[in-house]
Amino acid sequence: MIRKLLILGAACTLAAGLALTWATTPSNAADCSGGYVGLTYDDGPNPATTSSLLNALTSNGLRATMFNVGQNAQNNQALVRAQQNAGMWIGNHSWTHPHLTQLSAAQIQSELQRTQQAIQQATGAAPRLFRPPYGETNATLRSVEQQLGLTEIIWDVDSQDWNGASTAQIVQAAGRLQNGQVILMHDNYATTIAAIPQIAANLRARNMCAGMISPVTGRAVAPDGSGPTTPPSSPPPGGGACTATVSAGQQWADRFNLSVAVSGTNSWIVTVTVRSPQKIIATWNGTPAWDGTGNVMTMRPNGNGNTFGFTVQHNGDWTWPAVSCRVG
């Protein structure tokens, strides 16, 4: 199968500038019958690695979402434009990569807004997607995101590249991706870049394609926004929004319970991220799935309503886990 990127000329360049149109013909069209996945790369752009990452992605016919750190984008605007010209989508990953849940609303606003401005200055368009550093989120952060028109994107699969995962382990993690799911990777690791050809081959073998992340659902869809995970034209039962409210339950010397009430939809996906060395040791009233670390739980309804619970073995850290919600 020929995998060639056809870059249309000036007629396909938007007024904002530097936009790239990808085209397919019957001879190079990929089989995407297995669905779409979201490849994401955090913490760029970096002068030492971003060009190599983009070359690896484009030469293997892949597109991805780049969650850029604002100060990196400000200092390397040519690389931000290179990301855009290579057909990548660009998201906001805060200005300095802090623990945003420990900051005030005004500080969070500055972190996100400065990044929006830096990326818009480089590309002509402000991001619509936001990846919170460390996957940490709370109501204050989500309120600022909403004010800026940003959709919060966590992940379904963690490649663990930040934790020293080998190329083979990164490839194995990507092999677990299912239709609509998103994987966390990073811009600045040679092992991650080396994994790209094998990730591409695995996706082809499963008739899957790399897609965009929908700002509406937070799920991977076709690059034109269509596909099986695109939301229906009418809201799902219960509404098209999703809010997860966490409340305390029983607690003991070594563990504590939390309850999550979901409102706005009956078709929901809640992501719960604990801080190591915490562990979730029990759940109820939902169907959980786990990333490779065991620190990120994705909960879906199992027919027992819109409230579920779980037990955290705290191992000395009583901090409540980060909880985010999206429409399923």
Image (cartoon, grey):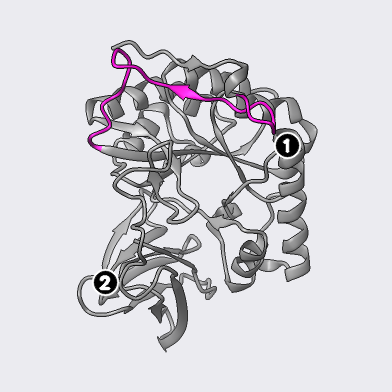
Is residue 280 at all visible to an observer of this figure? Answer: yes
Q: Position of residue 20 (x, y in %)?
A: 56, 25
Is residue 104 at all visible to an observer of this figure? Answer: no
Report if residue 25 lies within the magenta region: yes
Query: Residue sitting at 51 percent across and 72 percent down?
Result: 316
Callout 2, which amino acid? Gly
Query: Residue sitting at 68 percent across and 67 percent down?
Result: 102
Q: Which residue is mark 2?
A: 286
Q: Position of residue 177 (x, y in %)?
A: 31, 42
Q: Relative to 256, does residue 292 appear above or below in the rendering?
A: above
From the image, state whether disc 1 or disc 2 is nearer to you.
1
Count of numbered badges drawn on the protein: 2
Report if residue 202 lies within the magenta region: no
Q: Earlier in the sequence, mark 1 or mark 2?
A: 1
Q: Which residues are magenta?
A: 13-34
Query: Residue sitting at 36 percent across and 31 percent down?
Result: 171
Q: Nearer the viewer, residue 207 or 255?
A: 207
Give the main secondary structure of the magenta stretch. loop
Q: Which mark is residue 220?
A: none
Q: Nearer the viewer, residue 128 or 15?
A: 15
Q: Are marks 1 and 2 in contact (CB under 8 Å)?
A: no
Kindly give the residue lying farthest to the left in the view shown: 303
Q: Which residue is mark 1?
A: 73
Circle 1 Cα neighbour tier, 10 Å, few/some/many (<14 / 14–19 / ≥20): many
| Secondary structure of residue under mark 2 | loop
| Secondary structure of residue under mark 1 | helix
Q: Position of residue 319 (x, y in %)?
A: 54, 73
